[in-house]
Image (tube, rainbow, N blue to C red):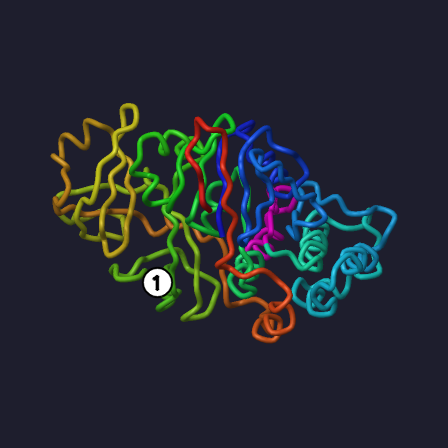
Amino acid sequence: MLGVFGPSGAGKTTLLHALAGLRRPDRGRMVLDGEILFDTSARVFVPAHRRRIGLVFQDNRLFPHLDVRGNLRFAQKLTSGADLASIVGLLELDALMDRKVPTLSGGECQRVALGRALLSAPRLLLLDEPVSAVDAGRKSHLLPTLRRIARQLDLPVIVVSHELHQLLYLTDQLLLMEDGKCVAQGRFQTLLCEPDALKLLHPGGIVNLLRLRVAKHQPADGITLCSLGNSPPIRGPLAKCPADAELTATLRPEDVILSLAPAEYISAQNQIAGHVKSLVQHGDRTLCCVDIGTDLFVDVTYCAAAGLELSPGKRIWCLFKAHAVKYLFEEGDGATDDWTSAKSTIGPTLGRKNHVPRFFLPKSSPPCDP
């Protein structure tokens, strides 16, 4: 999965429309799974209906005169796509099949739109702000569903979002855009060490995304102990999910204090030693990457960095409160899907994860290979 991020007007939605064949670029070349979709020099332009690319629009664009069943069957008629019953079960649409589109909530509409896209048997799935019209409660269900679909169905996905933490929940592989150009591409942690990329990421609210696993609950203390890769245990607020469940949490770089030694008589429950990995100055601040067994980014003022004499390799302590750890979604405590069965039924009709598009932006921008 590739996430596309950038300010309003950067060209994110235009990029998706060009890939889907809804807009014809002035120049360039697009190749998907070895097939040339667009090439100005060779005068090739494959129309949208022949590309087998699924696009879920920001405003879902369902047919209002049809019920949910009709919307899904319309897509199924166009191709020998996936089994309808499997998609319905996968997205929990059973109870909605006879409902008219105007009676659906934003989250329900997005699930139907996603189901319609999957039923067209795409070899590439494009998602344009997939949860922008969804309330907070439904986001906690829809985003994990999107991530599981990408993982289990061997389906390459390109997703656009203006919410950086939601994008990072889905993938840490990002394409950054500005003024219709590809500014940078790569893993989020790598991009944070590039000044040009950092300028685009910072307004979106940089966060540390923590993939945690619950080790132990301590109700009397109001905290939950979690493991994080090779780092020492992380103490967070008391979680609702059971032991050994997976948790995705955020930790803002400005919520972490750096110290040359562990501190006594303070309320910070987490004090973890590490080594400075890199330093990137942006404005009057410095973004410090600390290796604590995993990369942890800390935002400090330039004078604080100078006062601590921070430099790569220096031993440093990261201090932060348990309640600075914010859980995004608590997985493992909700309904589970039979994903193995779903993959065997749906997977053979869909694209494969090794088949990803190669597209070129204008000549002043480097080619990007998501």
Question: Dividing the picture into quarters, in which one does residue 22 lie?
Answer: top right
Q: With respect to residue 242, does 192 lie above or below?
A: above
Which one is nearer the viewer's eye here, 254 or 80?
A: 80
Q: Which residues are magenta?
A: 124-143
Q: Residue 212, position in %: x, y? A: 38, 60
Which one is nearer the viewer's eye here, 282 or 218?
A: 282
Residue at image coords 47%, 30%: 181
Question: Which secondary structure lies at badge 1?
Answer: strand
Q: Residue 221, position in %: x, y? A: 35, 61
Residue at image coords 42%, 48%: 173
Amino acid carrying label 1: it is Cys
Residue at image coords 49%, 60%: 330
Which one is nearer the viewer's eye here, 330 or 311?
A: 311
Question: Dividing the picture into quarters, in which one does residue 13 lie?
Answer: top right
Residue 46 in the magenta stretch? The answer is no
Residue 142 in the magenta stretch? The answer is yes
Which residue carries the number 1 mark? 226
